[in-house]
Image: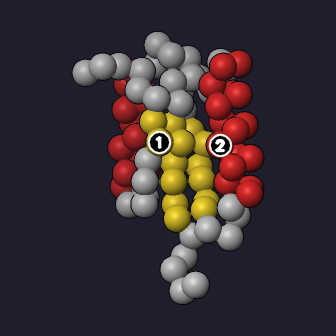
Amino acid sequence: MSKNKYQIPVIVKAVRSEFWQTLLAGAKHAAEEQSDKVNISLLGPPEETDVEEQVQILHAALANAPDAVVIASTSNE
C-alpha cells in the first residue's frame, strides 16, 4: 500500500470528562487495531463550557488537512 496512514483528529467536548475519556479510549483502541492504516489525534478542551477553545482546536486540526474529522461539538451554532 503506497498511501500514508489516514490522519484523523478525534475532538471531544471535554477531555476531563469520564464519559469523553471512555470515548477517547475506544478511539485509541480502534486506531491501535488498525495502526498500519490510521493515525489519530485525541483532542478537546478541558471542559464542555470551553466552546471557543474547541473551535480553535478544530481550526488547528483542519489546518493540517486531515483525511477525516470526528467531532462531538460543544455548540449547535
- Disc 2 designates what residue? 27
Q: Residues within 10 Å of mark 1 (few under 14, many from 20)?
A: some
* Residue drawn at the location 37% of the way across and 51% of the way down: 62
x then y, percent, for residue 52:
37, 25
- Please, is residue 26 above or below residue 14 in the view? below
The answer to whether residue 57 is seen in the rendering is: no
| C-alpha span from label 2 to label 1 | 10 Å
Q: Nearer the viewer, residue 58 or 12?
A: 12
Give the labeled residue for mark 1: 70
Q: Secondary structure at mark 2?
A: helix
Local crowd size for mark 2, using a 10 Å CA cut-off: few (<14), some (14–19), many (≥20): some
Q: Please identify the quadrant where the N terminus is shown.
A: bottom right
The amino acid type found where label 1 is placed reads Val
- Where residue 6 appears, as percent x and y from the top left, is 52, 65
| Residue type at tag 2 | Ala
In the image, taking residue 64 as reference, residue 17 lies left or right, namely: right
